[in-house]
Image (cartoon, rainbow, N blue to C red):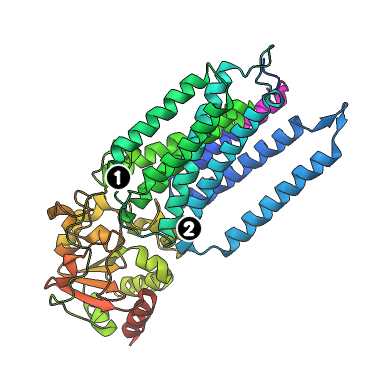
Amino acid sequence: MHEGLPVNPWAALAYLIAGICFILALRGLSSPVSSQRGNRFGMAGMTIAVVTTLVTHYPMVAGAIDTTTAIEILIAIGIGAAIGILTARRIAMTDMPQLVAAFHSLVGLAAVLVACSAFLNPAAFGIVDAAGHILTVSRIEMGLGVAIGAITFSGSVIAFLKLNGNMGGKPIMLPGRHVLNLAVLAGILALIAYFTQDQSGWVFWTVTGLSFSIGFLLIIPIGGADMPVVVSMLNSYSGWAAAAMGFTLHNTAMIITGALVGSSGAILSYIMCRAMNRSFISVIAGGFGAVADTSGGEAKEQRPWKRGSAEDAAFLMQQANQVIIVPGYGMAVAQAQHALREMGDILKKEGVSVKYAIHPVAGRMPGHMNVLLAEANVPYDEVFELEDINGEFAQTDVAFVIGANDVTNPAAKTDKSSPIYGMPVLDVEKAKTVLFVKRSMGGVGYAGVDNDVFYMDNTMMLLADAKKMVEEIVKAMAH
């Protein structure tokens, strides 16, 4: 038995309870209705796991508690808790995607630091044999842990920079990227295999360096339109990194939690890829959805288009039988969800059927629009996924698109040169009238391509800040 394994049956029971809490948390997070309950289960599970680990691994010196080390641990926990609470209170909903990417990077970095600590002082982790050599199985765990952790860290940093606007949303095409990625990945796996036979420092540190580099190489070619899948994929990576380090630390809770996060993230990525008609393998290989954009990514301002006012929009929607609202990242940036719900409430009072159409990758992370609408107390039974509502646009009087460009772009169905080609989109152009809220005609979507819906005969452009425009529509409806 490894020296670091908890032998206390109560500790094993506590870790089991924590694992059950994490499973219930995932189940709760599967629906907006039960998401708060899911978060509470997750918090309870993490509290049980942390407290159990601290109790069963008291820092001891000569049979007594090492007070100095215990105080250092408590200070570290306090600093982390303070940062977490402060961040949670101050973060805007529009910045949630980059916050998630930043958290993923920290999980990856933690896995790298644990692996490095275990390599530098394996005896403290109880992973050495009688001759003082690192156990073979521990070398495998260590190699995989540092590799996945480093990939997660560097990939999440690139994702953060793209989501935060520090890097452009367009794919950065590297020459021979697929060959380069496969060569580096093959080199990492070969070195991990060699590490089981030779625990020389150069092998471990080379694996670490190559893993950091492949994380950058994998994410750089991915365009902004595919960022929600990337966030989900990195979430999966962070889980597997935590699970690998759980084996190194002999911590059951970490293994369970990491496996749950890793598998659920992988399943979510697969579901999203199917929803976008993409290949899951191409995500892992890098360059997901990255093709050359021959259109130049410029809005075609010289084409004729119709501009409308808040009064025009209010009149059209009040005369409609059904209005389908399509929210996108523009709504999130403007924080227009509360005004949007107020507009919907007015329409419902006047006998208009109001529904919300959500694209699987609207926003910058999975479920981004659902979270915003739930925050505004939009009834869950009015919110529909793409496959459930796309057939209704042809019988809809008004499609009200608020800041959703790429997910409504018909070029995804017709233009093979488009970076979003093949992605299922919401068929808003089939509605009798399309009201499209956008800041200006000069910009393009996050994928960098123009939208033909802007120039269709049944489209009326409402050019303004999304929140301001919806508030003006609400005022016009009240008169």
Residue 191 coordinates in the image, percent (x, y):
46, 25
Regarding residue 265, the answer to whether it shows in the image is: yes
**Is label 2 in a helix, a strand or a loop?**
helix
Q: Amino acid at mark 2?
A: Met
Q: Position of residue 266 (x, y in %)?
A: 40, 37
Read off the residue under disc 1: 288
Magenta span of residues: 5-17
Q: Residue at x 50, y 32 (%)?
A: 206
* Residue 117 image-quadrant placement: top right
Q: Quadrant of the C terminus?
A: bottom left
Q: State left or right for residue 135 relative to residue 292.
A: right
Residue at the spot 32% in from the left edge and 85% down from the top edge: 476
Q: Quadrant of the N terminus?
A: top right
Q: Nearer the viewer, residue 318 or 236?
A: 236
- Out of 148 and 36, give the one closest to the viewer: 148
Q: Is residue 306 above or below residue 72?
A: below
Answer left or right for 174 relative to 415: right
Pinpoint residue 386: horizontal percent, then vertical percent. Answer: 26, 52
Look at mark 2 in the image and give the residue it sits on: 96
As helix, strand or loop, the secondary structure at mark 1 comes to loop
Residue at image position (80%, 40%) is 70
* Tag 1: amino acid: Phe
Name the chief secondary structure element in magenta: helix
Can residue 457 be found in the magenta stretch? Answer: no
* Residue 251 visible in the displayed image: no
